Image (tube, rainbow, N blue to C red):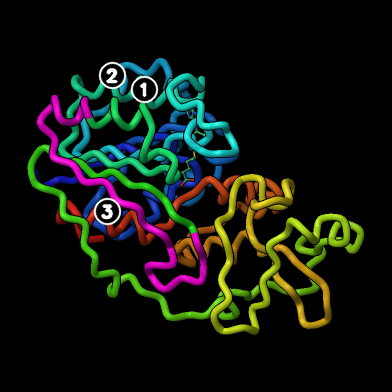
């Protein structure tokens, strides 16, 4: 492995990968995302402005040489909500382009994160075939935040590939373990009106809402999507308050559940709706650290 670890983060969003690299030997030298709100968050936290180019047409020559490629492509082509159209979904085009230009870039280590539906996809078959042709050894694994003791179910599929060694995904989650119960993560002001679910909405949607009582020690929340707050069904849990009210989980609380450090902040000018949309797309930072450790990189 070369001494200097440089990385490119594709589909960078708010930068879960850059967050996992904070304080490590990895230098993120470029990031790519089309979403201007996500890029604003990224730049304010990591002092690097992501490139807004559409990744569908990016060429190998446009990408700086780097040791590591990390990517979290859009999950809709592989999720049930998106009807699992796989490689025929236009939103898979950018990933397919990156697979096609991989032979001209050849990072030492390649990582990908996606929803569980990616496991059986045609795009994964295509990616793995390309990795093998290029001499990468790879491992794929499903990791859920609950494996780190986090009171949250968020299963995600990861691929780690390397041209220089055999990736070994550790099954020892202890060093990244967090013993806090759900109630310990809930630090927001219960009277913050931005978090309130109004009575009429509660009555209307109660049958499809996942409402969690944090006073129960084993309570856990389910996976947040970018539709949290807007789309009521299966888009993330809400919190039962002792007086019968129900509230949303704040963006800051979700960041904490995802393993972001206190240093990470949404810009103060950004409203909760935008912050929820962005964090719902993001990744558990501990899972990224675990994947990096599979190729011997400690963070
Ligand atoms: C699943 S999210 C990744 C989120 C990211 N890992 C994070 O930590 O927030 C996918 C991201 O890809 C971006 N994206 C989707 N299609 C793109 C394209 N064709 N070119 C560039 N960015 C794209 C979206 O704006 C979105 O932020």
Q: Give the distance between the C-alpha atoms of the residues marked 1 and 3, in whole angstroms.
A: 22 Å
Q: Which residue is mark 1?
A: 96
Does label 2 or label 3 sit earlier along the sequence? 2
Q: Secondary structure at mark 3?
A: helix
The residue positioned 19% from the left and 39% from the top of the image is: 67
Kindly identify which numbered label has been placed on residue 178. none
Is ligand 1 less than 8 Å from the beta carbon at label 2?
A: no
Indicate left or right for 98 with 251 as reference.
left
The residue positioned 59% from the left and 63% from the top of the image is: 252
In this rendering, the answer to whether 148 lies above or below 243 is above
Q: Quadrant of residue 214?
A: bottom right
Region rendered in magenta: 129-153
Q: Which residue is mark 3?
A: 291
Indicate left or right for 200 with 155 as reference.
right
The residue positioned 53% from the left and 34% from the top of the image is: 76
The residue positioned 31% from the left and 37% from the top of the image is: 8
Membership of 41 in magenta stretch: no
Q: Position of residue 224 (x, y in %)?
A: 58, 54
Does label 1 or label 3 sit earlier along the sequence? 1
In this rendering, the answer to whether 219 lies above or below 254 is below
Q: Quadrant of the N terminus?
A: top left
Q: Which residue is mark 2?
A: 100
264 vs 93, nearest the viewer: 93
Q: Secondary structure at mark 1?
A: helix
Is ligand 1 less than 8 Å from the beta carbon at label 3?
A: no
């Amino acid at each position: 492995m070369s001494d200097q670890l440089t990385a490119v983060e594709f589909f960078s969003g708010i930068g879960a990968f850059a967050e996992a690299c904070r304080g490590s030997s990895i230098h993120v030298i470029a990031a790519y995302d089309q979403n201007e709100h996500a890029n604003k968050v990224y730049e304010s936290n990591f002092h690097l402005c992501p490139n807004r180019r559409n990744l569908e047409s990016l060429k190998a020559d446009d990408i700086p040489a780097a040791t590591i490629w990390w990517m979290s492509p859009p999950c809709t082509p592989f999720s049930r909500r998106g009807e699992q159209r796989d490689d025929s979904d236009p939103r898979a085009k950018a990933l397919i382009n990156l697979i096609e230009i991989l032979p001209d870039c050849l990072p030492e280590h390649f990582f990908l994160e996606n929803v569980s539906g990616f496991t059986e996809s045609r795009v994964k078959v295509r990616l793995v075939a390309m990795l093998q042709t290029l001499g990468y050894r790879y491992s794929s694994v499903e990791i859920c935040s609950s494996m780190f003791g986090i009171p949250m179910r968020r299963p995600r599929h990861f691929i780690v590939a390397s041209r220089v060694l055999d990736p070994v995904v550790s099954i020892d989650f202890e060093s990244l373990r967090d013993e806090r119960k759900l109630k310990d993560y809930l630090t927001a002001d219960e009277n913050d009106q931005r978090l309130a679910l109004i009575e009429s909405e509660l009555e209307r949607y109660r049958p499809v809402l996942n409402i969690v009582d944090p006073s129960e020690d084993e309570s856990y929340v389910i996976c947040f999507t970018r539709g949290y707050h807007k789309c009521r069904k299966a888009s993330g849990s809400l919190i039962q308050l002792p007086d019968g009210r129900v509230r949303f989980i704040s963006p800051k609380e979700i960041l904490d559940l995802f393993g972001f450090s206190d240093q990470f902040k949404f810009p103060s000018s950004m409203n909760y709706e935008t912050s929820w949309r962005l964090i719902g797309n993001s990744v558990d930072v501990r899972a990224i650290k675990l994947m990096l450790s599979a190729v011997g990189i400690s963070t």
